[in-house]
Image (spheres, rainbow, N blue to C red):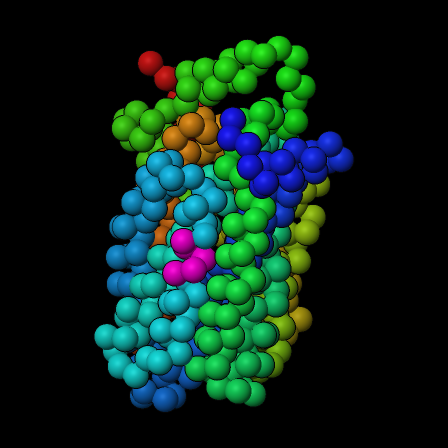
Amino acid sequence: MRINLRNKFALRTNNKFYYGWAVLLLSALATFFSSPGQTYSISAFIDSYIGEFDYTRTMISSIYSVATILSGSLIVFMGKAVDKFGQRRMMMIAGFMLGISCLFNSFIISIPMIFIGFFLLRYFGQGSLTLIPGSLVPQWFEKNRALAMSLLAFGNMIGNMLVPAFNTYMINTYGWQVAWRGWSLMLILVFVPLVYIFVINRPEDIGLLPDNEEVKHEDDLAKELEKMEKESFDLSEALRTKEFWFVGIISMMIPLISTGMMFHFFSVMATKNVDTASASVVIGFIAIPGFFMPILASTIVDRFRSKYILSISSVLIGLDLLYMLTVNSMLSASIFILIYGLITNLQSVTLNVIWVRYFGRLHLGSIRGAATVFMVIGSAFGTVPFGLSYDLTGSYTAVFIAMAVLAFLGTVLSLSISKPSKS
């Protein structure tokens, strides 16, 4: 165990409360600072791009999709880097690079620059600063893993709630270029230093056990590491199980639906008689159900098999998407988004828990990195169907029906999975 000022501070803090909660807080902050690369944030800039550069909605959607696919295909390298260099170092690098990416986006003037800007935002934001916290928190929690992963989602939920309105205000008041530069400064001057000071990769690095279990004997840490190695799949072993592929495909559903809907959210709301100001409020409501997720995580995720949670939530998502066809006011739009937020949050927590529950935590970075490809590809393909639906028919009815059908199909895959055995 390496003793330095950071470790000494962590151990002193641990005498008062488990330091894993501090790591969880920093991880949630990381998911919040992934916002510049998330669709709910980028969506606020789309109308500015269309108006200033005179591009069609389908063109912008296609550029976004290709950039997202490319970033998703490369995110596995970030996962391998996390396993090799540790979450703390890679979280600092990703945060700094996302800050540089935001600065670059403030200077875009052409299609190639928009493509590069989207790629950088998606790789270091939506990809890396979602992957790294998702592999860091499970290192610190075992018995309280579902609770911890649901609390981790708070960062993204708060981003969902606040960032669209914040971006809209900054764009309308100062312009879209200044909005991007503001994010750059916050990432480089606030987020990266906090990670440097407080993040530690895993409890064993400072002589602790997950959940702050008591170290009764000197060899407890060695036994814990041996147990972790015995139970953990490496990436090649995980790839040989059907569960990796089935869970990966299921994890595509939410990004596929959410990215397309959020990317075009203000346009979708316009077709439902909801103005831009009201839409910027409604889009934030998606985060509200997440504040009840710690209670749901303790009562549902920890008590019921993951396959049944995923199957039921897939059905409910499909029904909610069909309800969207009846939305015609801010009130009904709010009801839709609240239901959608509740069910997708429950499914997301279940998916975050299932990776470490099925495959262990030793190689979680590379496994989550490979699995993130599914989610990023889902995000990539979500935008184009929504854009085509509007450009070809003048409405989003067809795409909401298609997405509902896909959600129902997710139920079949969910019922086909079970915890794999390591040979």
Left or right: 264 in relation to 330: left
Picture quarter with the C terminus:
top left
Q: Is residue 159 above or below residue 179?
A: above
In depth, the one of 84 and 399 nearer the eye is: 84
**Please, is residue 222 above or below residue 361 in the view?**
above
What are the residue bounds of the magenta stretch?
93-97
What residue lies at 51% left-to-right and 13% top-to-bottom?
A: 223
Position of residue 372 measured from the top left corner of the image (x, y, whole percent) = 37, 46
Residue at left offset 39%, top offset 30%: 363
The answer to whether residue 150 is seen in the rendering is no
Rendered image quadrant of residue 165: bottom right
What percent of the width, then of the height, locates residue 32? 55, 58
> Can residue 207 be spotted in the picture?
yes
Residue appearing at x 33%, y 27% in the figure: 234
- Residue at position x 32%, y 49% in the image: 75
- How many numbered discs, if any? 0
